[in-house]
Amino acid sequence: MKAEVFLPEDYRPAEDEPFMNERQLEWFRRELLRQKAELLNESKSTIAGLQSGTRNIPDVADRASEETDRALELRIRDRQRKLVAKIDSALRRIDEGEFGYCHETGEPISLKRLVARPTTTLSLEAQERHERREKVHRDD
């Protein structure tokens, strides 16, 4: 088993240290686990709210409004479920030593981008290329 890495409370990954060193990887691991716990906690309250929110509303407009709210809540929940899967994938990449590197080019992803979106798998340049290709194919 790996020894725990000490991180000061105010630690943030910095450009002036070796890329994806133990401290950076541990910071990202903790951040991803924090985000995952937050999402799972939100989903529990959503499920509880949906289960307790079932009522018989006689007014058609009020019923439609409540159904719309429930549908929106379920869409949000689905997006959160997909994000949890991305977080799990990022945690796996940390364990496998692949975290922080672009899946397309193999180049390091900028720390700014990783801090803003730790589940990312593409560098900014590769993401822009991907979006341009997607737009071209969508316009067909």
Image (cartoon, rainbow, N blue to C red):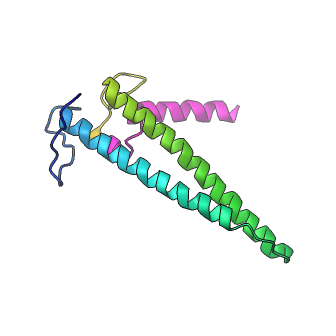
Image quadrant where residue 133 sits:
top right
Up-down relation of residue 63 to residue 88 (above or below): below
- Residue 29, position in %: x, y? 31, 40
Residue 122 counted in the magenta span: yes
Residue 118 counted in the magenta span: yes
- Residue 42, position in %: x, y? 50, 58
Quick check: 86 left or right of 10?
Answer: right
Give the quarter of the figure containing the C terminus. Answer: top right
Up-down relation of residue 62 to residue 52 (above or below): below
Q: As rendered, which of 19 and 27 lies closer to the eye?
A: 27
Whether residue 112 is visible to the viewer of this picture, yes or no, is: no
Up-down relation of residue 109 to residue 115 (above or below): above
The residue positioned 67% from the left and 62% from the top of the image is: 51
Q: As rendered, which of 85 and 18 lies closer to the eye?
A: 85
- Residue 107, position in %: x, y? 32, 25
Q: As rendered, which of 50 and 90 lies closer to the eye?
A: 50
Image quadrant where residue 82 sits:
top right
Q: Main secondary structure of the magenta part?
A: helix
Image quadrant where residue 88 sits:
top left
Whether residue 137 is visible to the viewer of this picture, yes or no, is: yes
The residue positioned 21% from the left and 29% from the top of the image is: 2
> The magenta stretch spans which residues?
112-140
Quick check: 32 left or right of 2?
Answer: right
Total numbered labels: 0
Q: Residue furthest bottom?
A: 59
- Residue 126, position in %: x, y? 43, 30
The residue positioned 47% from the left and 56% from the top of the image is: 41
Give the quarter of the figure containing the N terminus. Answer: top left
